[in-house]
């Protein structure tokens, strides 16, 4: 008699096994149901205040610490009736290509040389503000990948009538290399335009546990899916990094389901960690 094959991840339905209504710990979740953890909420409050005052700011955070969640929450917190938010994922573009990309996003004509494009972007921002009563906000994500000369354009983009008016708010967000880029001597004018520099950190042991529990709850969990030792193991391997917590905790759930277990133990976390691609 042949032995029954051990279930694989491809054959396991986490929702059915753990009686959930959604696959847990994925990147897709309602932003208004995020767990209000101190690092993220402090950064969000600061960025929202900066935008409300029509100024600009930077958000610098290590990979996997919740930068995208904060930006999503910021966009969600700005009423559509008052703000026109444009989110751009920045890459290492030339000055002209960056301006064309930006012009397209904001609704300006994406043609001409760099100077003409800057003027078109400024005029479009002014029209949104004066004619449509909308405050334009540009969110430039992954800004650590920007070329220094392109980052320097932000001074021109926020220069309206010799600084007599605050029309356009820009939020530049990126990983720690962005801080080094801003510290360069030629970036002094840009630093002077930033009213605040927000940062994020990894989560503590208690925050990590609360985060995973919350993400399981919004996925429909009605009982404990990790024991105490498993939560300790999660923190030890993820070190409070949100992205790692999501990946390893979800992997541990697959391992537990494959074992027909109703709760994850340390062994499931260890196996999940071993399967993460370095």
Image (cartoon, rainbow, N blue to C red):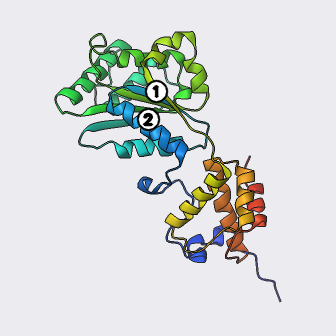
Residue 133 % position (x, y): 19, 33
Q: Residue drawn at (78%, 56%), measured in percent from left and top?
A: 274
Q: Secondary structure at mark 2?
A: helix
Instruction: Tell me if I can see residue 59 in this picture.
Output: yes
Local packing at callout 2 (Cα closer than 10 Å; few below 14, some 14-19, many 20+) is: some
Q: Between residues 116 and 145, which one lies in front from this camera angle? A: 145
Q: Residue drawn at (43%, 45%), measured in percent from left and top?
A: 72
Q: Are marks 2 and 1 in contact (CB under 8 Å)?
A: yes
The vertical placement of 230 against 36, above or below, is below
- Residue identified by numbered label 1: 196
Instruction: Tell me if I can see residue 24 in this picture.
Output: no
The answer to which image quadrant residue 264 occupies is bottom right
Residue 55 % position (x, y): 36, 25
Give the mark, 2 or 1, whose residue is nearer the N terminus. 2
Residue 225 % position (x, y): 64, 70
Residue found farthest to the left: 131
The vertical placement of 241 against 11, above or below, is above
Residue 65 % position (x, y): 59, 43
- Residue identified by numbered label 2: 46
Q: Residue drawn at (63%, 58%), measured in percent from left and top?
A: 209
- As measured in the structure, the alpha-carbon distance from the residue carrying label 2 to the one carrying label 1 is 7 Å
């Amino acid at each position: 008699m042949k032995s029954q094959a051990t279930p694989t991840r491809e054959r396991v339905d986490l929702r059915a096994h753990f009686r959930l209504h959604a696959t847990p710990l994925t990147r897709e979740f309602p932003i208004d149901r995020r767990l209000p953890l101190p690092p993220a909420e402090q950064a969000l409050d600061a960025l929202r205040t900066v935008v409300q005052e029509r100024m600009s700011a930077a958000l610098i955070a290590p990979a996997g610490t919740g930068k995208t969640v904060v930006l999503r929450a910021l966009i969600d917190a700005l009423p559509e009736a008052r703000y026109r938010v444009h989110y751009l994922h920045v890459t290492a573009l030339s000055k002209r290509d960056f301006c064309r990309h930006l012009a397209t996003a904001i609704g300006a004509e994406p043609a001409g040389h760099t100077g003409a494009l800057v003027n078109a972007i400024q005029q479009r921002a002014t029209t949104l503000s004066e004619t449509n009563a909308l405050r334009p906000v540009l969110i430039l994500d992954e800004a650590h990948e920007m070329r220094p000369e392109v980052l320097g354009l932000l001074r021109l983009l926020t220069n309206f009538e010799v600084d007599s008016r605050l029309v356009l708010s820009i939020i530049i967000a990126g990983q720690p290399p962005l801080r080094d880029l801003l510290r360069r001597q030629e970036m002094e004018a840009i630093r002077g335009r930033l009213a605040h520099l927000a940062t994020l950190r990894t989560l503590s042991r208690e925050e990590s546990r609360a985060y995973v529990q919350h993400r399981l709850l919004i996925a429909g969990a009605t009982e404990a899916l990790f024991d105490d030792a498993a939560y300790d193991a999660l923190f030890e391997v993820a070190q409070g990094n949100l992205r790692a917590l999501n990946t390893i905790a979800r992997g541990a759930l697959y391992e537990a389901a494959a074992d027909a277990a109703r709760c994850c133990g340390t062994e499931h976390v260890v196996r999940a960690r071993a399967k993460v691609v370095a």
